[in-house]
Amino acid sequence: MAIYQYYLAIVPKEGILKKHNLIPNEIRINTETGYFESDAELYWKEIDQKADEITPKIDSFIKRADWGNDKTNFNWKTKSKVLDNDAFMGINEKTFSITEFSFRADLREDGFTFLKNMIELGKENNWMFMDRKGKLMNADFEEIKASIKNSDAHSFLNNPIKFLENLDNKNK
C-alpha cells in the first residue's frame, strides 16, 4: 500500500444492526499477525448482498484489474504516475454474496472523484466505512474527511519530511 492511499473497509449497516442492535463507534481490528484483520466480514454474513448488484457500478468508475476476478473475488485498479486507486471484493463462491469489501483512495487525486464515488455507492446501499483504527463512519464525505486528516497518508502528503522524522523519533 502506498503511503498516499487511504484505506477504508465497507461494512453493511444492516449487518451491524442485526448483530448488535446498535451502531458502535468502532469494530474490532487485529494486527498481531502482521496483517490487518477486522470483524467486518461478520457483518456481511448477516445480509445477502449479491456482488453482481454492485460490480457494474464500480466498473463504471474504476477499471477492473487484470488479476483475480473469479468466483471468489474481484479487484479494481487505477494506476498511473499520478493516480493509484484500488478496490477489493471478496465473494462467496456458492451464493455470489459479498463476504468482504475494501478500497484504497489515492489522496493525491484532484477532487477525490474515486472516494466520492465510493461514498455515493455507500449511501445508495446503506453502508458504513471503517478506517484502519476500526472507527466506523457514515457514508458522508465530511465525516470521512475528518478521519483522513488524522491519517498517516494525510500527514505524509502534508509534510513528508516531518512525517519521516516523526517515524524516526517513534523508533528511538
Image (cartoon, rainbow, N blue to C red):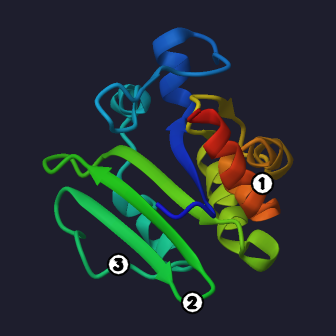
Q: Name which residue type carries label 3.
A: Ala
Which residue carries the number 3 mark?
A: 65
Q: Position of residue 67 (x, y in %)?
A: 24, 75
Q: Which mark is residue 81?
A: 2
Left or right of 100: which side holds 169? Answer: right
Q: Quadrant of residue 35?
A: top left
Between the C-alphas of marks 2 and 3, the distance is: 17 Å
- SS category of the residue bearing label 3: loop
Q: Position of residue 59 (x, y in %)?
A: 47, 77
Lower position in the chain sequence, tag 1 or tag 3: 3
Mark 1 or 3, closer to the camera: 1
Left or right of 112: which side holds 3? Answer: left
Lower position in the chain sequence, tag 1 or tag 2: 2
* Front residue of this view, candidates 130 and 168: 168
How many neighbours does mark 3 have within 10 angstroms: few (below 14), some (14-19), or many (20 or more)?
A: some
Mark 1 or 2, closer to the camera: 1
Mark 2 or 3, closer to the camera: 2
Left or right of 120: which side holds 132? Answer: left
> Looking at the image, which residue is at 57% across and 28% down?
134
Mark 1 touches mark 3? (CB < 8 Å)? no
Q: Name which residue type carries label 2.
A: Lys
Q: Name which residue type carries label 1.
A: Lys
Q: Position of residue 17 (x, y in %)?
A: 55, 19
Q: Where 95 falls versus 159 (above or below)?
A: above
Q: Position of residue 140 (x, y in %)?
A: 78, 46
Q: Where 163 falls versus 78 (above or below)?
A: above
Which residue carries the number 1 mark?
A: 162
